[in-house]
Amino acid sequence: MVYTKEPTVYPYDSFNAEEDGIALRSAMKGFGTDEDTIIEILANRSNAQRQKIADYFANDLSRDLIDDLKSELGGHFEDVIVAMVRPPTEYLCKQLKKAMEGMGTNEDTLVEIICSKDSKEINDLVQAYEEMYDRPLAEHLCGETSGELRRLLTFIVTGTRDISNKVDSALAREQAQQLFEAGEDKFGTDESVFTKILGKENFNQLRQIFEEYKEVSGNTIEQALRSELDGDLLEAMLAIVECVQSPPAFFAKRLYKSVHGAGTDDDTLIRIIVSRSEIDLGAIKTEFERIYDKTLESYVKQGETSGDYKKALLALIK
């Protein structure tokens, strides 16, 4: 990827797992809970440092940090704090499973998590998912999705995406022509061609294909997709295109949508702020302000979040 990754959470320079562990245990002992201390410590430590605090709880205190937090906290505040303490890949696997549980499937969550990842990130997710649930992610996806969206998502998670990150300009021109002939240049749309190319090629190659597409068609790839596809498959394809071109813009739009309108999509709001805080939440903030002419911080403040839940989110946004 060519964009600059800009976190908001960095490793704490004066980190001491024992000191933090004692302070957190003290914040949860006795009558009442010191939520401010919990936020102050966890929002200002990297995930690797939070794992060391969890290890201190397990090895020195014979306690489970997540269980302790769950017993003392509640609501969406608990959700944010527990999300911060889980290893990132484990947390996203839990979110994928939640999206496929119960009545109906949350395709938006599946698309956001799977279509935004490069080959290595997908491999990590696939491996962790099977270890956690003793079931391949691809198999679970096949049972919970359908049609061309199922084909695209399983295509991505079965590891067919090129891992070289190399660009073949001549091939990109050919592939742009194939996309044009499968969509705008014919009556009807051959969705399988879009699925194969957008689900298989590495992000650098896709970036080149999208540039070539403008030359071949005169339209952008987004314009072509919107005219040829609809529904969940369109959203998945657009997610791939945005994450190839600008992941921060993709996540900024998802954050806006999570708070905009009646009711807040708290799962999405928490997931993006927590999972991107050590990657590119700083860049997402910049894009958010550029697109919406307001800061992400002010947007979260004016939304329906409140109390310690709001404080924890703002501590990560900084």
Image: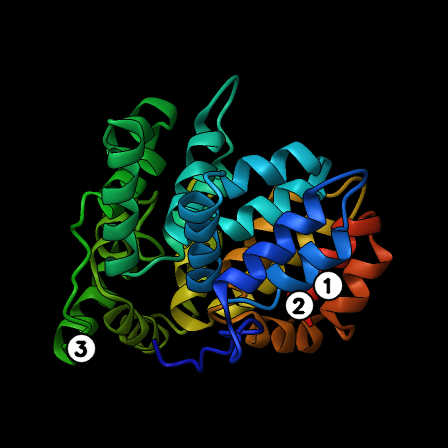
Q: Quadrant of the C terminus?
A: bottom right
Q: Earlier in the sequence, mark 1 or mark 3?
A: 3
Q: Residues within 10 Å of mark 2 (few under 14, many from 20)?
A: many
The residue under label 3 is which amino acid type?
Val
The residue under label 2 is which amino acid type?
Ile
| Dot label at residue 167 | 3
**Mark 2–mark 3 contact, CB under 8 Å?**
no
Disc 1 target residue: 314
* Residue 66 percent across, percent down from the top left: 53, 40
The residue under label 1 is which amino acid type?
Leu
Give the SS element for disc 3.
loop
Question: Residue at 57% of width from left, 61% of height from top?
Answer: 20
Q: Residues within 10 Å of mark 3 (few under 14, many from 20)?
A: some
**CA distance separating discs 1 and 3:** 39 Å
Give the SS element for disc 2.
helix
**Mark 2–mark 1 contact, CB under 8 Å?**
yes
Disc 2 target residue: 317
